[in-house]
Amino acid sequence: MTADAPTGFRYIGRRRRPKEDRRFVVGAGRYVADVTLPGMLHVALVTSPHPAARISRIDATAALKFPGVRAVVAGDELAQATEPVFTGLDLPKMKRYPLAHRVVRYVGEWVAVVVADTRAVAEDAAELVEIEYEPLPHVIDPEVAMRPDAPPVHADHGDNIFYRRRFVWGPVDADFAAAPHKMAYRARWHRSATVPIETFGVVARWSPATQLLDVWASIQMPKYPDNLARALRLPGSAVRVHFDVDVGGSYGVKRGLKHSIVAGYLARKLGAPVRLLEDRLDNMRGGDAHGPDRIFDVEMAFGDDGVVRAMKMRAIDDVGAYAGRAPLQLGKPIGAIVGPYRIKSVAYEPISVSTNKTPEEAVRGFGQAPTNFAIETGIDLIAQQLGLDRVELRRRNLIRKDEFPYTIPSGSSYDSGDYHAVLDKVLAAADWAGLLRRRDAARAAGQLAGVGLSCCLEPSGGNAAFEPLLNPKNETTTWMEACQIKIDLTGAIVAVMNTSSSGQGHETLVSTVVGEILGRDPDTVRVVHADSLGALPSNSPVGSRMAIMLGGAAAGAARKLRAQLIAIGAHNLGVAPENCLYADGAVALAADPAKNASWAQLVEIAHRKYHLLPPGMEPGLQATHVWEVPTGGALPAADGRVQMYPCYAFEAHVVYAEVDRVTGQTALRAYFVGHDCGVMINPDIVHGMTYGGIAHGIGAALYERFHYDENGQLLSGSFMDYLIPSSHEVPNLTIVDHCTPSPLTTFGQKGSGEAGYLGAPAAIASAVNDALAPLGLHTATLPMTIAALGDLLATKDRAGAAS
Amino acid sequence: MSQHEITLTVNGETRAARVPARLTLVDFLREMLNLTGTHTGCEHGVCGACTVLLDGQPVRSCLMFAVQAAGCEVVTIEGLAPDAAGMSVLQDSFCEEHALQCGFCTPGMLLAAHALLQRNPAPTEEDIREAIGGNLCRCTGYKQIVDAIALAARRLSVANAPAADRPQP
Amino acid sequence: MKPVDFDYERPRSVAEVCRLLGQTGREARLLAGGQTLVPLLAMRLARPAVIIDINGVDELQGTGTENSSVLIHACTRQSRALADPIVRARLPLLAKALSFVGHAQTRNRGTVGGSLANADPSAEIGLAALALDAEVEARSARAGRRIPIRDFFVSPMVTALAPDECLTSVRFPVAHGVIGTGFQEVSIRRSDFALAAVAVQLVLERGVCCRLAVSLGGAGATPVRLTAVEQKLLDTKLGDAELAEAGRLAHDGIDAVSDIHASAAHRRRIAGALTARAIAEARNEALVGRA
């Protein structure tokens, strides 16, 4: 092994126990609700019962008299004292404050907060706050909201369109005209979200003596400290976010900026630490963490061979009453708008629509999962129309391995892949022919049974070029990540990461990478989370970026340290660095390995023996690496073409399902997924997130929906009606791995934090539709609940029949 | 506000306290005894993150008031390990199989699994899924959890397992 | 989600429970297993001034036999009832129903009496009790009385119990002969509230059905006996044609509610299918010869 290039991996890719697990299995995790400070006050929310109304009177007199109550704050006060909450689009006339300002725009919107000695007392007093409303017209259906005569959710903005643009890449119309076949369909992805078991919470403490706001939060959000500081009109150096809070799951949604602004404001106003912790009802209705709510109208133009030549897609997303970051979820899928297929021209029209519903937030995949569902629905419909096998049709359409890097019409280049190999692997593992026989036997016995398939991409790396794409005033092209590593005087290695974690195993990721480069056991590498004042820049775990970006940053810093160790060793052995060998932290003379400098000796020289340090070298052993996302750094072209995420993982799902002919219940009997995310740094972590993503996908496909009535009331606002899959609803899952490394990353790794969720809904829909096909039925609406399938199946009942 | 004196055993220790009637058992454990390993995910008895053992049986501690636990024996996640520095075979199996990610549902999951292995040392996959059917997880898809519990069952059934690792009757 | 403040009593005897309930001017709720009451308290949908915790009343615990009936006292845990050898031997339909109730964790606290008094239209225990012609015993400071189960469920979450009455036990007659039981339920996830559930107990004599009880829950305002089905199928061999007719009668003859989880029409369809399936299950069990 030479000094520079390791051959093969010692720790990367091996099954190793994730470091984090140890503290969680003994109940020693530290979540935001575990953070208690002396004198801490608690917040309860007063929320709107109306979907749209003017607030005509707020009277907190009775509430303020309640024993234990410290304050009641409402929208006017907060609107004067804070800046509006960040939004991703250019919407100057849409102002969003944490508390409704003069007008409420959705049921559950926060109108006032009550601060008291305990949460229970705050809730008691919240019931005493008197609020008078004058109801206004409201709009719930997004297609109704798009009409010019619809009541505007934001009167100043004028209409309910937050964003609309039609992108055309390639000769779409000509390709459609020339194609022998065309198909048009609608796919509906109803509103759901990844709903973590831990709700969002924040604790804020202001110290006038140091002019510092300390913040602990269950947060997963890029640019959270600076957005919080800006809203509170504080310099960034006056806000210290503690990233060492364990986050109990996020999968995108924990962006509680409005919660944090409230807590920060209250902490300063009241001179006491303040905790704002959502309870489950707060979370579901007013936590502003709903997921995509999409209507896709899609047309595909294809040949007799089923190869899709062109696609037109209109994607309406009902983002609810305010635009945060969620509308950008219409932009991210542009980076994989054709999925894994060789579609040559595309017209894409994203439309972000406002209605009087809870605002959406970022959800796992950032819009990719619904888009994949829309694309795969079409692929299956084409197969059905042409009488082609669904597997064969996909084989014909999939990008071939010799075509990489492959640039899609919207400008992104897919780095690497071998989709056919992954597909073959999963079909073999699932015994596709066997599943078909099983299905046919079930059908012969009178059951509805189906086999489903989906192929889709997981863009990873987090180059959020959709930001400038959807908002040209935001010319952000930097998507960096950083890591600092220190080797102290005792020889202990500490790596510092600069953001929070919510179960992705970042500490294990970093220690494995550092251990690999430095040749030291990863278990001896401690990984800590800096706070935002001590941290280097980070863009947080989003967009399946951390294996690539944090892994790359850690590797970069580790390489600098290794080079430094080699230089120290070489200097003390009296040779040039290229004449040395580095192994396990020691530097030896290549020509005579018995002459070496041990780890301890190198460390001591660096820290203590300046006289033995190479001239000009900084003392100590610490290195930092900050780097930009590969292929990032460019603004979109005028037609919207831009490189989105750098690395593309691939998944192929195979599902066997049975549907009860009368009840409409779906049982998933077999589930396989082929997964290629390049080199896996820790396989158990990658597999775990994939299994979890599939479970999320099962929820979105069959069970979960934020269900609104025509009055904007959320009917599924607790866990009694919003139904999260349990161990009974998620079957045993089998993952088959494949590896086509990325040429763009340190070890060939691609991201995979969003895996499973991106392809599962499409695959389950594929299976259910295969089950329905003998009856001539089809659905392209998720979730495929008992209610939905039951009523659909009933359309085929003979009059009065029940079995 | 009605306050009540209660005495109960928590993780083998006698604890005495004065509690408001409306204080739930989970809030009592977390806030008054500083045992923050038990978590609240919904406060209406669905997610199971608040699972503790009450007189040996797994229950949802958000659906009980502290005052109701007077005279009872409660075991929380902090009481599951055989000693302060160690882990039970079950906890170790969770680490071996990576049966958790964010860790929020994990204490409840472990206690439900522990109760299963107490009464059924050789559970089938269906038995395991039934036992954790009332504990929701959003991270793992349950697969590695099921594997971990099965692993723990196999390890505990090994005839020469150390006595300290065997489930207590 | 913290409850409103309340006073808390923990009586030791039924007499004391009744005395507390009888006190005027206090709005009280009885707390048994708490699996349904405590969520209501947390959501502030229930706002009692007093909670009377009956878990410490020994008289309300346990099972027993009385002539040809099985007696289950109100505060008996569902898990205990499910494991009870008397229940399993003499009330197989109730044992079946109990295995569908919630999760193991909720059954460790939930009680048989509490479930009945809660009167959720989709609750399995009430459904089985209705099929078994059970009798509820209630006591107040004024008097004690027995309420036939057919008169017990009034509307969703409302029973015939007076505000000052405590349900103390439920009495199940034990059937004799070649018995078959069936319990079929459709819920969205395994342990959710039933969209519809059917409980059946029948007796076969030389292959002919001589006693039949069919009850349906989850579809309408209360669990109901499907008397039209019972009358139609009595004295038949419960063949396929009869089962199909039973399903049709159930489908056509019941009231059903609509909500986000299923339309009324779909609940009717499910009810029809489950009626046929549950009767078939019971018939097959009896044919195999459970004595």
Image: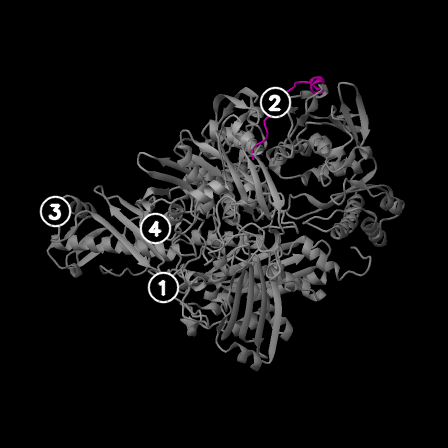
Residues drawn in magenta: C1-20
Q: Is residue A226 left or right of residue C86?
A: left
- What colour scheme has been applied to the protein in the rendered image? one colour
Label 1 crowd bin: few (<14), some (14–19), many (20+), radius 10 Å: many
| Cα–Cα span, label 2 and label 3 | 73 Å
Q: At which x and y percent is residue A460?
A: 42, 60
Asked whether the viewer can see residue A49, the reply is: no
Q: Nearer the viewer, mark 2 or mark 4?
A: 2
Residue where numbered disc 4 is placed: A510
Callout 4–callout 1 Cβ contact below 8 Å: no
Chain at numbered mark 3: A
| Picture layout, residue A669 above or below residue A648 | above
| Residue A432 placement, left or right of A444 | left
Give the CA separation, mark 3 to mark 4.
30 Å
Residue labelled with disc 3: A610
Amino acid beneath label 3: Tyr
**Residue type for callout 4:** Val
